[in-house]
DNA sequence: CTGTCAATGACAACCGATTGCCAAAGATTG
DNA sequence: CAATCTTTGGCAATCGGTTGTCATTGACAG
């Protein structure tokens, strides 16, 4: 059995170490955080004692006195959406590497929940990463003034952001469909509050006009596989031969519905998704989609946030990062059906 | 512009309220947390002022002085595994409903990372939920002695747990396969450190002996779609006509590989998964699998943990909860191929 | 009219660290 | 040998609450 902390089962504090080493608590604090301010021999003793007692600083106390919490809030609209899994994984990895803790919050696609989460996190986190914010531009800007923030897939001047460049990939998708002979194409829109969906539609409409093909907008549809049924029916009813969906969830849902209705993909209808989430490669048929570097976006967002928090080295941190995407062609797109 | 906190942009504290109401800070604290200890009129004034200043208690300070953090750690072996998405969603929902914050940690399938996370969380969380722990029985028991804990899918006497009863579902799966005429069946095992995999195999082997069919164990395989390729090859090589996979990820990976190799499912080979994760219903062919109430398990785990933390009402909290599962038959299982 | 008790709210210690300020001790220099 | 500077480490305040203790007050019973 050990000598010192035999009886005490509660975690060691800075005072325990101070008592053992015969120094003041403040000296222990300095030895551990500002080693240069302490004599090398005292420091060694203190560090040895700390290791002996298996000391870890109490993060609450640290946060209270220093003002920094060592935590970063990550806000996502829907924790069950696989898109955010990849994002969360990216942030988690990078945050852990930097010694930060991730506070994950599901804002349930609600601007109110999101606003209150921001208010809450303002005190318990050093910064936040907001994915696909549902807040208005003004509200987001106001929030960014209160707490260091990086937005993901949300472009508001004045708010540092990581934006996945799906809009430019939509023209690749469009060209792909055109090259397969499609002339009547639909865009299956996402939520009205989603800026991504709006930007994607704008880019698509511009590209369509440029190429002289007709693209109509249908929806909005909730970004869930279940809404794919409605989307599929709407697409069939509108008479298009190909669709570009707001995201893979809708696209996968469409595939299921089209199969149920006996409409063959891609012979009768081509479907393009967006994001290349888990499942896009093994659905039936495998989904042609715009592949996004989601996890990487999460890592970049964390890097930008940390740069904001610790503005140490030279070179001001970039305030906007555009992530490239590309079209991944699989089995859900094919030649347009011959006109009757 | 407002009267009081016009200039100050930093969050209001208990002292601000005290100053406004002309009472001591402690009175404010009591008015908000122990309303009965304060005169109803003073209380009203304080509450009004608190609302006016948009006061929210500082969670760090609260944690430091009260010893309770209002946070619960959730440890999962692999944050990218869709199984845990559902679990996380369940815990997130229930924790939020109870006013707790979720601290999500990815232990990377490593017992060391897991142990250090537990040690860390011990000070910054009121309790933890450990999914599919990789710790030894002794280590887990020791950890549970230090901090309130609920294990998920890990059965160690003395540690409260939520266990999804997949072992008993394996005999359903086996009977299903037998009824389809399969006589040579393989179990594609998960990680050696996974207790779930071991229990599932034990149950399956017992059931097989009971029914007089041959079930061999192959693997272990990592619980990822990528390992499905190796699993598929092993299954084909072993000459079985049906497999029961440790989980859906492996099963889905197998489907992909079998398709590549031109082996038809279910005509040449039947595949059964486990968990019914996102994707199991739209892969090709749709996967026959043992459906687990994963999200519900997360919610139950939180309830059990909270009951442990606040042992208020009568009826000691249950220390073990078994979640029922059932077989969901889809397209990946079919009649055994006729013997040559 | 006085003694007892409950209700109320102030005071101060405390949670575990950080940090500004200062004094003591040792090193350096003229 | 004295004067000055530097290193080192202690003291105490602070962060924002919680909570035990105690004094004051008014109500009520005897």
Image (cartoon, coloured by chain):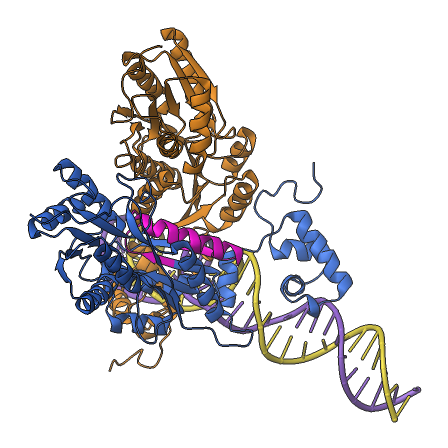
Chain colours: A blue, B orange, C yellow, D purple
Q: How many marks?
A: 0
- Quadrant of the rendered image containing residue B277: top left
Q: Position of residue B221 (x, y in %)?
A: 48, 30
In magenta stretch: residue A60: no
> Which residue is more in the foreground, A45 or A77?
A77
Residue at the spot x=39%, y=37% of the render? B308
> Which residue is more in the foreground, B236 or B13?
B236
Q: Is residue B155 visible?
A: no
- Quadrant of the rendered image containing residue A77: bottom left
Residue A181 lies left or right of residue B30; in this view the side is left
In magenta stretch: residue A79: yes
| Residue B202 vertical position relative to residue A38 in the rendered view, above or below | above
Residue at the spot x=51%, y=36% of the render? B145
Q: Position of residue B196 (x, y in %)?
A: 43, 27
Residue at the spot x=17%, y=54% of the render? A182
Residue B250 lies left or right of residue C20; in this view the side is left
Residue A247 lies left or right of residue B235; in this view the side is left
> Which residue is more in the foreground, B228 or A21?
B228
Residue at the spot x=34%, y=25% of the render? B271
User: Bounds of the magenta span?
Assistant: A74-103
Q: Position of residue B64 (x, y in %)?
A: 47, 57
Q: Position of residue A267 (x, y in %)?
A: 18, 43
| Residue B26 vertical position relative to residue B181 in the rendered view, above or below | below
Q: Is residue A191 visible?
A: yes
| Residue B311 vertical position relative to residue A326 in the rendered view, above or below | above
The quadrant of the rendering that contains the N terminus of chain A is: top right
């Amino acid at each position: 059995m050990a000598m010192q902390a035999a009886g005490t089962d509660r975690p060691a504090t800075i005072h325990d170490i101070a008592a053992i080493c015969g120094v003041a608590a403040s000296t222990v604090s300095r030895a551990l955080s500002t080693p240069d301010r302490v004599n090398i021999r005292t420091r060694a003793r203190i560090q040895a004692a700390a290791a002996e007692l298996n000391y870890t600083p109490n993060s609450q106390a640290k946060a209270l006195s220093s003002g920094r919490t060592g935590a970063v809030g990550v806000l996502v609209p829907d924790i069950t959406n696989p898109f955010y899994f990849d994002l969360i994984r990216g942030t988690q990895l990078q945050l852990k590497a930097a010694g930060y803790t991730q506070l994950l919050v599901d804002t349930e696609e609600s601007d109110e929940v999101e606003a209150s989460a921001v208010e809450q996190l303002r005190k318990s986190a050093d910064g936040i990463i907001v994915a696909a914010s549902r807040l208005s531009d003004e509200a987001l800007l106001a929030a960014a003034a209160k707490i260091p923030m990086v937005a993901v897939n949300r472009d508001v001047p004045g708010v540092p952001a990581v934006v996945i460049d799906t809009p430019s990939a939509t023209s690749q998708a469009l060209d792909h469909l055109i090259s397969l002979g499609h002339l009547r194409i639909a865009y299956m829109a996402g939520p009205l509050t989603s800026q991504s969906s709006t930007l994607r539609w704008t880019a698509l409409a511009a590209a369509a006009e440029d190429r002289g093909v007709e693209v109509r907008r249908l929806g909005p549809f909730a970004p869930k596989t279940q809404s794919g049924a409605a989307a599929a029916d709407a697409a069939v009813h509108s008479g298009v031969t190909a669709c570009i969906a707001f995201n893979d969830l809708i696209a996968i849902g469409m595939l299921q519905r089209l199969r149920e209705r006996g409409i063959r993909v891609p012979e009768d209808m081509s479907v393009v998704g967006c994001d290349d989430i888990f499942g896009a490669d093994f659905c039936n048929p495998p989904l042609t989609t715009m592949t996004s570097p989601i996890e990487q976006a999460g890592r970049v967002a964390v890097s930008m946030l940390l740069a904001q928090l610790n503005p140490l080295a030279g070179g001001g941190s970039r305030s906007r990062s555009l992530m490239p995407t590309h079209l991944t062609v699989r089995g859900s797109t094919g030649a347009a059906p011959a006109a009757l």
